[in-house]
Amino acid sequence: MRKIVLTISLLLLMKFTICQNMVSHDLIVLPNPNFKSNVSIEEALQKRRSVRSYRRDSLHLFEVSQVLWAAYGTTLGHKKTCPSAGATYPLEIYLVAGDVKGLATGFYRYNPLNHTLNLLSRNDYRKQLTEASLNQEYIQEAPASIIIAAHFERTTKVYGKRGERYVYMEVGHCGQNIHLQCEALNLGTVIIGAFEDDKVKKILNIKGEPMYIMPIGRKP
């Protein structure tokens, strides 16, 4: 009887360990974001430009972490870095990582509440996204891209048809945050809105409506 109990206990422990490893492997805790820098908001605004070519250099995980926080991370009082009508927060932020030091190649969903990434796929979707975006090659050339997707129903269930307008506004706020943070880090990005929505949704297997694709890399 004791042997049976011991065997069952060992099996449960092994299962628990495997599950723990899976969770820790698929959930990436990002470095804490910085809340101060040597670049003023005025300087970032003055330098902000659309950058469509990038050096063949890797990004670092702390840079990706900082940009994701700027995009839609939490601030004091559990608010987010950009305004949202009625705090409905209709956006989801995704990361396509192709060449990021400290992060495996793959497709991730950003979780603002605990500043983590959830691995959704180990595929590198940069080439497919390039093809779905009218062959804008800088998506494939950049080491990473951020995808902003919208769930309109989160806002329209509160504000009706007018809520659609509020969602579009929020996408713009989020994109500008990414732009300015990239400038503060001396990185380049560009907002891409020309793509085939259904193809992007199918490639990434997401339910939200893709709004922006923003490749990120080092300026040439």
Image: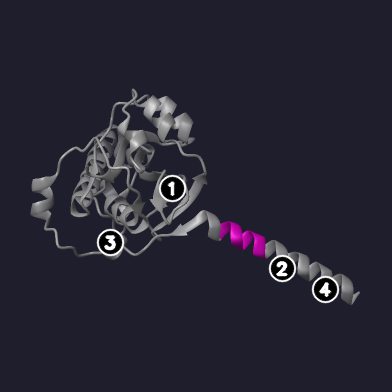
Report if the CB atoms under discs 4 and 3 are less than 8 Å apart: no
Categorize mark 3 by other alpha carbons within 10 Å: few (<14), some (14-19), many (20+). some
Q: Nearer the viewer, residue 173 or 10?
A: 10
The quarter in which the C terminus is drawn is top left
Nearer-N-terminus badge (4/3): 4
Residue stretch rendered in magenta on the structure: 17-23
Q: Which numbered marker is on residue 13?
A: 2
- Check disc 4 and give the amino acid type: Leu
Q: Describe the element under mark 1 as helix, strand or loop.
A: strand
Nearer-N-terminus badge (2/1): 2
Q: Which numbered marker is on residue 75?
A: 3
Q: Nearer the viewer, residue 40 or 75?
A: 40
Q: Which residue is mark 4?
A: 6
Predominant SS of the magenta segment: helix
Rounded to the nearest angstrom, the CA distance separating label 3 from label 2 is: 38 Å
- Rendered image quadrant of residue 31: bottom left
User: In the current view of this chain or complex, which residue is farthest to the bottom?
Assistant: 2
The quarter in which the N terminus is drawn is bottom right
Nearer-N-terminus badge (4/1): 4
Q: Which residue is mark 1?
A: 109
Nearer-N-terminus badge (3/2): 2
